[in-house]
Amino acid sequence: LAGDPALAATPEARAYQERLAFERRTRSFLQDAPTLDDKTRIKRAQALSREIDRREQARELSASEAVMMRIGLIHAAVKDENQRISQSQEVIDRYRQRTAERQAAFAAKQKEDARFQAYKAAESRIVSEVLAMQSYPGGLSRDDYLRLRLQEARETIYNAPDAAPKTPAPTP
């Protein structure tokens, strides 16, 4: 990147460089934390925590990355063992709750999606049919034939014209 200013100026290259800088700041903090005074250590941990918030909101960090980073910050910033355990558990509990809420919202959305319901009915029928077969066309294995049939069902159902908005087909 350093040799090509045009490439270094692209949004992707800048985002990559920012990510590397964030990772360097995080590693530096984790390495320096034991030697920092309480005020400086907490201030740097809070700044990194805000950056984790921002990056997670921008989908630059997955939930699992954010959890691990937050717990690492807690273990580096908080000296009292009981507080570290308590705060780490709070982070884990918060993410578990968010995950459960997202899964419930997704399930509710799927229940309202006529195409998804049609696919699930077809999927059940196709799986039963394929598992009952003794041989499969074209020399395909059972798994390959099942994958092919399910893909055909998804394409048929999700590409069918109707008034419902299209939702992405689930992947096998």
Image (tube, rainbow, N blue to C red):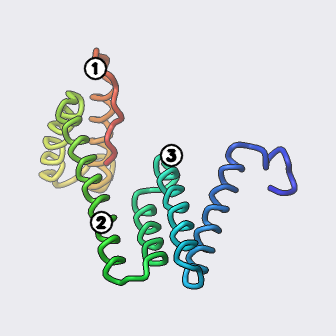
Closer-to-camera residue (138/20): 20
User: Which residue is label 3 attached to?
Assistant: 58
The image position of residue 50, as x and y in percent, is 50, 56
Q: Identify residue for label 2.
A: 90
Label located before the other in sequence (2 or 1): 2
Q: Earlier in the sequence, mark 3 or mark 1?
A: 3
Is residue 70 positioned above or below 146 on the image?
A: below
Tell us which disc is closer to us: 3 or 1: 3
Task: Look at label 3 and name its amino acid.
Answer: Ala
Residue 165 image point, x, y percent: 32, 22
Q: Earlier in the sequence, mark 3 or mark 2?
A: 3
Alpha carbon of mark 3 to alpha carbon of mark 1: how far? 29 Å
Residue under circle 1? 164
Front residue of this view, candidates 119 and 51: 51
Query: Residue 81, percent across and down?
Result: 35, 84
Mark-to-mark CA distance, 2 and 1: 41 Å
| Residue at figure coordinates x 29%, y 52% from the top left | 98
Distance from Cα at disc 3 to Cα at disc 2: 23 Å
